[in-house]
Amino acid sequence: MAQPECLECVRCRQEYPLDAFDRQCARCADDGVASNLTPRYGAGDSPSRDDLPARPCSLWRYADHLPLAAHEAVTLGEGMTPIIAIDGFGHGPIWVKDESRNPTWSFKDRLATVAVSWARKIGAPAIATSSTGNAGAAAASYAARAGLPCVVLTYKGAAGAIVSQMRSYGAMVLTVPTMEDRWKVLSRAVRDYGWFPTSPFFGPAIGSNPIGIEGYKTLAYEIAEQFDWDPPDWCVLPVCYGDALYGIWKGFDEMKRWGWIENCPRLVAAETSGSLAAAAAQDIDMPPIVPRNSKSIANSIDVTRATYQARHALKHSNGVAVALDDTALIDARDRLAAGSGLSAETSSAAAFAAVDVLSRSGMIKPDEKVVAILTATGLKDFGMDGIPQLGAPEVAPDLDSVLRALGEIYKYNV
Ligand SMILES: Cc1ncc(COP(=O)(O)O)c(C=O)c1O
Ligand SMILES: [Zn+2]
C-alpha cells in the first residue's frame, strides 16, 4: 500500500487530517469554491511497474498506489475490465473500456471497494449513501461483503432495477421528500453516529468520499497497462460529480511523474448540464448552475452543476466538456447496442455521443487513439422513466407466420 500522509485540498493544497474525509476545504469555501480533498502520499522513490504481471487480476494489483494493502481489501474481484475495439462513432475504431463487467455492473465498484475497505479498517459502524443509482448499488454490495449495515436515503421518484438491486444486497433503502432532506439527514447521521459516507451529502456538492475516489486511479493504471504504457490521446467518460474524472486524471498524472508513461490523455467530460463547458468558457473555478426545463433521460448524470474537482481534471489535462441532449444519448445508446453488441445505460452512452460530436467537429483527429468508458450496463435502466420496455410480439407457431412477422415487425425478409 501507499501510506497517505494527510488529505489535501484539490485546489489550494491546504492540509487536513486523514479523518477529514467528510469535509470540504474550509479555505476554498471562504473563496466561494466548494473543493474536495484528496489523499497525499510521501514523495518516496518512483515505483517500478515490473512486478505487475505477477499481481492479482483485479484492481488490487495496484495496491502499492492505493491507501490500503491488498489483504485489507473488501473485494469482489473488481477491475481489470476488457478493452474492446468498435466502429461507428465518427472516428474509425475506438476503444471501449467496458466497466459493465464489474461485480455490480458499473464502474462505481472501484470507488466502493476502496471506500468500504477503509470504513471497515477504521471501524465505521455503517455505510451511508444518498445515491439511488450505481453508487448506491455498489455501496450496498460491498457493505454486504464487509458485513456492515448500509443505509441508502433517496427522495421521491427513485425506482427501477437499481433500487431492487440495492435491496437484494440487504441495504436499508428509505425515501425522504426532497433531495435536500437526504443530505440534511445524512449530515446528522455522519456527525452523530459516525456512519461512513460514500457519496456527497452536503451542497454545493464537492464529489464523493476522497478515499474512495482513489479507486478510480486504477482506471488510468489499467488503461496504460493495457496499451503497453502508450496511453490513448483521448479518454472520454460520462460525468456527474466528476469523481471518476478526477481519479483518472490523478492516476495518469502520477504515472507521468513516475516515468511510467510519457504523455497523459486529454480527458473529455460528457455531461448533460453544460456546467463544465460554461466554467471553461467563463474561465472560472466553480462550475455554475445551468438550469434546464426538464429532466435528462440520463438519470445517473443528471445534475445542473458540476464540481470543482471535475473542472480541475479537465483544466489540467487540456480537456474538453461536451453537453449532450436526450436525442444524442438515445441515438448513441441504440447504435452501440445494435451496432457493437454492447449494452450501456443511457448515461453511459454519453461518452459515445461525445466522441461523435468531437470527431465531427475535428477536435478529435482521425489518427488519434480514443478510449471511451462504458460506465454501466443497459440493464440498470429498466424501470426508469423514458426507457421503453421492449416486448416479444406473439406469433402463431408455424414457420410461415414467423417469417411473415419477421418481415412485418422487424423488416427482416429471407
Ligand atoms: C453510469 C454512470 N456513469 C457516469 C457517472 C458519473 O459519475 P461521476 O460522479 O464519477 O462523475 C455515474 C454517476 O452516478 C453513473 O452512474
Ligand atoms: Zn482549498
Image (spheres, grey):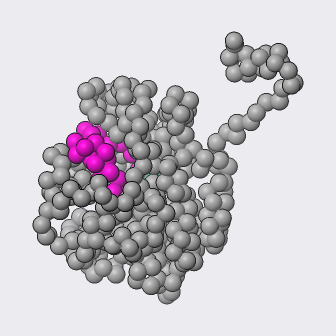
Residue lying farthest bottom?
192
* Viewer-side residue, 107 vs 199: 107
Is residue 194 in the magenta section? Answer: no
Q: Position of residue 140 (x, y in %)?
A: 56, 67
Which corner quadrant holds the N terminus? bottom left
Q: Is residue 68 left or right of residue 330?
A: left
Q: Is residue 223 above or below residue 312?
A: above
Name the residue located 67 percent from the left edge and 49 percent from the top edge.
Answer: 383
Residue 363 lies, in percent from the top left, at: 27, 31
Number of numbered discs on residues: 0
Residue 131, position in %: x, y?
53, 63
Is residue 270 visible in the rendered structure shown here?
A: no
Name of the residue lying farthest toward the front? 54
Q: Image quarter for residue 54?
A: bottom left
Q: Indicate the quadrant where residue 263 lies.
A: top left
Q: Is 240 contained in the magenta span?
A: yes
Q: Is residue 255 left or right of residue 342?
A: left
In the rendered image, the quadrant that contains the C terminus is: top right
Q: Residue at x 61, y 64 (%)?
A: 166
Residue at 39%, 56% (x, y): give it.
Answer: 57
Where residue 115 appears, as percent x and y from the top left, is 42, 70
- Residue 143, placed above or below residue 412: below
**Depth check: 12 or 90 in front?**
90
Task: Tell me which segment is drawn in magenta.
Answer: 216-245
Q: Nearer the viewer, residue 345 or 399?
A: 399
Q: Residue at x 77, y 17 (%)?
A: 403
- Asked whether the viewer can see residue 258, the reply is yes
Q: Is residue 243 above or below residue 282?
A: below
